[in-house]
Image: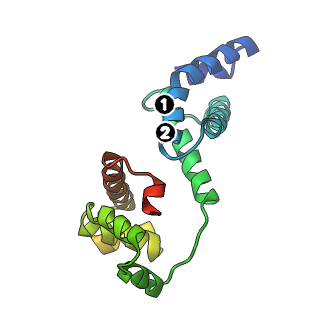
Amino acid sequence: MEALMISGNTKATREALFIALYQKAFPAAAKYVSKMGGSFDEAKDVFQDALVIYYEKAVSNQIAIHVNEKAYLLGITKNLWMQKYREDRPNVPFDSADIDTAFEDANEPATEKLMHYLETAGQKCMELLKSFYYDNLPVKKLADLFGYTSTHSATVQKYKCLEKVRDTVKQKSLTYEDFLK
């Protein structure tokens, strides 16, 4: 396994290994970051951070790769991107009165479009997403409230709900600007 070879070899060997890992895993990482709204430069930054984490774990023998290095690096990249996304995203608090008022305003075409695409995911998905994003319920509470066996199951279901909405938007080839018209 390549992770075991990092710590005891020469600089040239480590460089060759990093180049091989970069060639093997970076295209998938860049595709993921792009899909999640990031730029090519952001993908490079996040992936390089993932390589550093990989290297540090390999050198300290803390690494336990169960699939392969590419999947491991992609997992680190996804986690780093989501962390960056959460930190960079502005948090605007809503109270339930604001949400109810916004969705009742039928004169707002953006709200109508957004609600239409959220409804395509189904009522349970809408309730789950509302509970997480607007009511700010922790995942543990969501799992209990919606009857999931674990927080992981609730997280997976939340992701699936978001993917349903994303797929519908992609099928219609919509952009952010379409919601502002």
Q: Amino acid at mark 1?
A: Ala
Q: Residues within 10 Å of mark 2 (few under 14, many from 20)?
A: some
Query: The C terminus lies in which quarter of the figure?
Result: bottom left
Residue at 61% across, 37% down: 50
Q: Residue at coordinates 65% horizontally, 14% vertically from top-left?
A: 16
In the image, taking residue 4 as reference, residue 179 lies left or right, namely left
Side (left or right) of 167 relative to 29 = left
Render colour scheme? rainbow
Give the percent coordinates (x, y) of residue 82: 54, 51
Using the rendered image of the protein, determine whether residue 75 is visible from the camera's viewpoint: no
Q: Would you name the residue on which mark 1 appears?
A: 28
Mark 2 near mark 1, Cβ–Cβ under 8 Å?
Answer: yes
Q: Nearer the viewer, residue 127 or 110?
A: 110
Q: Secondary structure at mark 2?
A: helix
SS of the residue under disc 1? helix
| Residue indicated by mark 2 | 32
* Camera-nearest residue between 83 and 88: 88
Q: Is residue 27 above or below residue 145?
A: above
Residue furthest right in the image = 11
Percent position (x, y) of residue 59?
Answer: 67, 29
Q: CA distance from mark 2 to mark 1?
A: 6 Å
